[in-house]
Image (cartoon, rainbow, N blue to C red):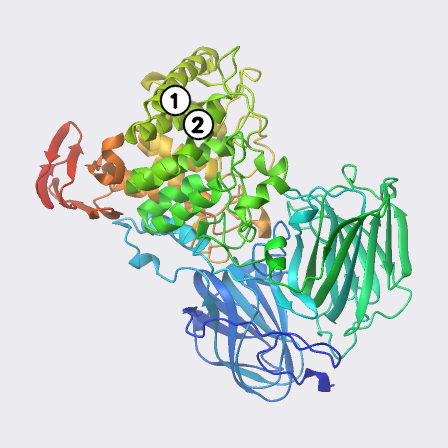
Amino acid sequence: MWLNSWALPIGLLHVVTATAASVPKVQRDSNTNVFVPRGVSVGTDLVVDTDNITAFTLDAKHPLATLDYGTERAGYPFFTVLEVAEPVQIEVKYSESFVGLAHPWADGPYAFSTGLSNSFRVETFNITASGRFSAPLIQGGQRWQSIRLLSEGTISFSEVGLEATIDTTEVADFPGQFDCDDEELNEIWTLGAKAASTACVEKGTQKATWEIDLENGAYIRSQRASQALSGAFFSNYTLVFETMIERSGVWWSVAFPFGRGEGLQLQLVSELPEGSSFLNTNTTQTPPNSILLSWGYDFVNQTTLTSYYLDTFTVPFAVKEGLWHSVSTALTPEGRMVVTLDSQLVFNISISDYYTPSTVSFDGSFGFGAWQDQAAYVRNVEVTDSVNGSTLYTNPMTTSDVLAEHGVQANLESVCLDGPKRDRLVWLGDFYHTARIIGASTSRYDLAKGTLDFLLKTQIADGEVNIAPPMGYDPTVTAPAAPGGIFGLSDYQMLGLDSLYSYIRQTNDLEFLQSTWSGWQLQAQWLINQVNATDGLIYVPSAFLGASSAGSAVSCLAVQALRELAELAGTIGDEEVQSNCTATADALSEAINSQLWNDDIGVYSLSTSQPIDFSVAGIAFCITSGVANSERTSRSVEALEQLALTPGYKDSTTANSSDPTVVISPNTNGFLLDALYKAGAWDTGASLMRSLWGAMISNPETSSGASWEYVDQSGNPGLSLFTSLAHPWGGAATYVLTEWAAGLQPAAGIQGFGYTHWVVSPDAGLAMGLKHAKASVKTPSGVLSVEWEVSSGGGFNVQIGAPPATIGVFRLGNETKHLCGNINYQISSHVS
């Protein structure tokens, strides 16, 4: 049966009821670069082996199209309809892995943050005429897409794709390159390069996700409820707002603290009239004329993102679309929650009557959103104290400052996210690997600099910066609104300082360093203050990499950060900071070696309280920081065998090797990979690289073309569909291959900043069995490149292209050559 209300203009992706005000159209540059699929398959089932992309038609016999972009892509989905026989509905899914397309939610939803994107990986469209239309919200990262015809009728597409929201430069065209005679390693190198290029975004490319109407307020679609900055410290309050549902429902949250997931989520579902409801609407999940209540992030679970569905309440009347409704949610000091709709009581409950894993607090902000395919207006928001009735907040929601208030404005700075699909936050610790990958591949130093600047703007008085600021909020005002949570994981502060060092080492951007030095100086003092006066080790409130009190990973990481800070301070002439950082690092190193080295097991203990346990991160940073001498380095590498799991190393001995749910972290294994090559354990490093990073390219159903967040013991994505399959923190193999397999590195110390002095040392590549390798990096003075090859008779030929006025060293075994005065060098030698 065909519904007259389907007759919508092709450019509108929502149904407009007769009484609803007109919706402002999404305005974007029509000349935007696009990504198009590499292949398509049309039929009744999803197919991993697609044919070359061409125009295609969906009908009753062939209702499903599988589209393969070949690698990770990101942008606003667009569709060019060649012909539509009668009004049709299509369901579109997006997924980084092929297997995600078979699931009801694809590989979503993602309610951890709003991320300036669609929170859902499934969206539905009414199509009534030929032409080109675009979705209003970004799909942040995917290789795969499917289009299913839901209704009767026929539709033909001449083109489908994504209006790019990331750099469209292909990996083969990056300034930084790597190539060798081992194709597996070549493909592994591209993983981190692709992840970094899709996770780093330019200023203003991630557009505002709400639209503001001067009369009707905020128009919201398919996005997790986004919190108001002004409500951060509210408690026991009553939230009142008006909403006009355009399609299906509206989502709002209360008692939802910044930086945490323990919020109360509510969803008002309309009567779901046939004229505006999609054919795939799940009326079991969202029954008509109801209010859903949950606690956590969402209304459904997504692997590690646990949410707790609490109840569904029936509204005592039909919830009409296209009409204004008044919603009131009261939170009382007695722990009661009272919700009314149009002044009629819907429920009055004691929240303690429902199971949640911890006590529900009525502290925290409020926010607004819309569930999958829902669309609604919100206006005239008022918050009052539930005890005395005093007004705490009012907002008509009709001016553009609402976008900043709720963190849904276009991104203010160029930043690198943890991943394009999720979490789409500027994670401080993740940037450790991203910064180094940029130097080896994309050379987008502007994005690295923007990230550091963005993070520094969140700095608080003690020197710490926000560990995961969202890009839609103003970083200078978000921090005061988020006490506690976003300044946890203290070791991320140290990883962030390492990222600064990587940026300066690659660019020699001393102007940036000097102009922002007061902030880094403050953070350096924060780090020095974490040294315990009694035992001389690091004690912090919390840590990601291991024990937060007197732990080897955090303490050795601190030594590394302090030594790097000393170099940076010396570069700009701050002798006081240089001296303090050096002295603190020396004393800390001595304390680690005297108190954390366990000679019986031949490795650094996890912590002073766990002397027989140890970790990947502890081994890695005790090597790369220089804390471990050569003998202790060798013994630590030998101890790794006790952490071995297919296809890598478990994080620590405290993880049960017999537990199949224990996953492998390419992040911590990436720290280790770098340490193994620095330690000369090239065989162990190469084996790890082929095993762990090889898993990311071996299966076409899970391969995204980019590095993964976690890997399970079977070589699959470690967090199931929730896993980010374009996570730069998993891309260390990219810079390790450039620096060690090809042997192209900046010289150690200040002299190496900006590759003013450089080193070419192919020993590791030769030990890996390579016969040919080449690499290039972009330096401030120009491109630095190396290419070497082993001939059949053992001859070894090297060609180096160097920027003018730079100085290099070539090392091969015991042979050393100093190179200066030219831009091209040819070296011949012999290898056995």
Question: Which of the pair 6/378 is nearer the observer?
Answer: 378
Residue at numbered disc 2: 524
Density class for disc 1 (Cα within 10 Å; few <14, some 14-19, many ≥20) is many
Is the C terminus in the top left, top right, bottom left or bottom right quadrant?
top left
Residue 261 screen position, x and y as percent? 67, 44
Which numbered tag is attached to residue 59? none
Question: Which of the pair 406/4 is nearer the observer?
Answer: 406
Question: Which of the pair 154/413 is nearer the observer?
Answer: 413
Left or right: where 475 falls relative to 329: left
CA gap between label 1 and label 2 equals 8 Å
Left or right: where 344 falls relative to 122: right
Q: Is residue 32 visible?
A: yes
In the displayed structure, 825 sits above or below 525; it is below
Residue depicted at 56% across the width and 33% down the height: 489
Is the N terminus in the top left, top right, bottom left or bottom right quadrant?
bottom right
Local SS, label 2? helix
Hey, which quadrant is residue 610 in on the image? top right
Residue 808 screen position, x and y as percent? 16, 36
Amino acid type of disc 2? Ala
Question: Which of the pair 68/296 is nearer the observer?
Answer: 296
Residue at numbered disc 1: 581
Local SS, label 1? helix
Residue depicted at 78% across the width and 73% down the height: 321
Left or right: where 192 falls relative to 268: left
Residues marked 1 and 2 touching at CB (< 8 Å)? yes
Amino acid type of disc 1? Cys
